[in-house]
Amino acid sequence: MELTKEQQAVIHSSGNIRINAVAGSGKTTTIIEYAKTRPENSKILYLAFNKSVKLEATKKFAEKGLSHVQVETAHSLAYRYVVRYQNKYKVSPQGLKVNEIVELLRLKGNGEKHTEYVIANHINKMLAYFCNSNKQKVHELDYLNTLRDPKAKAFITPFYDYIVMQTRILLNKMDKGEIEISHDFYLKKFQLSQPQLPYDYILFDEGQDASPAMLDVFFRQKATKVIVGDTHQQIYGWRFAVNSLEQADFKTYHLSQSFRFEQSIANLAVEVLKLKRRINEHQSTIPITGLGRSKALKTKAVIARTNLGLLLKAIEYVVEKETAQKIYFEGNIQSYTYAEEGASLYDVLNLYNRKKQSIRDSLIKGMKDLEELEEYIEKTGDVQLSMMLEIVKKYGNNIHNILKTIKEKHVENDDKAKADMIFSTVHRCKGMEYDSVELVNDFLTKEMLEKIVQKEDDNLDVAKLNEEINLLYVAVTRTKNKIYIPETLIPNELLKSAQIQVLKVNKEEKNESLKFNKAIKDSIKSKTQDSTKEKAYDVESIRNTHNGAYRAWTTDLDDELTIMFYKGASINEMANHFGRTKGAIISRIKKLELEELYD
């Protein structure tokens, strides 16, 4: 294979370097060729992003006869040094659940319902934050600054010192081997031991999403260091990852030519990245050259930003495409119906139906009703539980048959290539590529970005908006041939080509991922009517206390509501701001489909 001048420059470089590589630019090939040119008696460590990438890289290095290259993930390396060698730790596959933390630490609340569970949730998050950080002590962290939901931050602030103390106690129990440890814990233990690894070269892949803990280990090594990634593919900020490419003070090389797709897709990717100039006028983007020539249409994928958006699209697909017999979900299909804490979609459904005896998860079982669950979600910012709650609200008891149909059509990993359609969120398909990609209409749109910038001005959450744009960039660059993209995402007529198909979106259903069938509509409608009957309002009292209750919703008011929702304002805050009832605010949020877009 003929290498580009950019690849040759990397291969013949010396000393510590960083490589900023655009999607599909052959960085793995470049790294392999880099390793081939190093002395055969040298020891080389290649750090892969996850297990699937590790397996693929191991295979490729072996095919090239590079036996002196050892392939690891950060966790597999740490596991060997901490868990296997010390032989006193037992790892919990799923980590501690909230209810287990409550019992272990004998947590006490303040008398309000489920306060101890809310506190336990934040202890769990603080533990993960510390373990992924490069800090030596828990109290060196500013956990409150990581909370984007104002209501969650306000609720937790009085308990902050208590949470810090209990996090330290939990870490101590893990350190002594009294309880099972998390994967994050042994990575932290590895970092704190300040290991010197026996390698001459360390090749760190996907550096833009490295944890500060692993980055600290990497920088401390005496070996020649190579870090490679794409600054525009950082999408794990919510897992406390940092863009280590920006922190590595090494000589910089670029791989700007993509072998995955042709120039029209490259132009689309550049257009997405140009959105960053709206939040940072000094943002620069390197040009992307598309060298791909694939005409195949064998592998087709639907990619969404959120689990909710993806499930809605999958439901639409199995309902409308009766001829489709085989589908596949990247990652374990069960992960789309389970939260990290272990609660399932069926647990939330049983709470919805008031079938307490059928709920398996103790946290959900302790909830009186959906209203209590909503309150818990508001105080913890639990995105996965929020997603499951919204699905239950939309589909009710239709969920059973819907999921049964999806699972019946789902094929196993070995048969992925036989699937008529592959479904994935952006996070799960990172590093993947498909012949054809369709994007779900749940990404941040150019129109919405403009409105946020205009409204917020100097108070922009730049990091979050930057990652939202990165999510769209990663999604559009998964294709090798064609992409189907909603017009709301990139409404630019110049981007139309044989490879880019713009999907028209009905104006009234602009932000809707699925047109409900009549049965589901009726189910939701009846549930909504039943719930509104429980709270009757006197018309005159509404007129007196909510002076905006009968004012028509305008475009400007909708924009204002959207911005407040995006910033995490509570229903009460929005109701007071607009002078309307909470029911009116909830109804408008549903009408605008804000929950699907920004939860």
Image: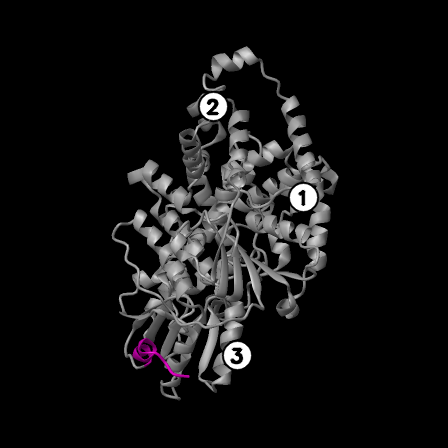
- Residue that mark 2 sits on: 552
**Label 3 – label 2 distance at C-alpha:** 62 Å
Task: Name the disc covering residue 92, or none.
Answer: none
- Marks 3 and 2: which is nearer the front? 2
Q: Is residue 42 above or below residue 91?
A: below
Q: Is residue 139 above or below residue 18?
A: above
Q: Secondary structure at mark 1?
A: helix
* Residue 528 in view: yes
| Residue 290, quarter of picture | bottom left
**Tag 1 or tag 2, which sits nearer the N-term?**
1
Residue 293: x and y, percent? 45, 73
Residue 323: x and y, percent? 70, 58
Q: Secondary structure at mark 2?
A: loop
Q: Amino acid at mark 1?
A: Asp
At 33% across and 63% down in the image, what residue appears? 245
Segment tinted magenta in the rendering:
1-11
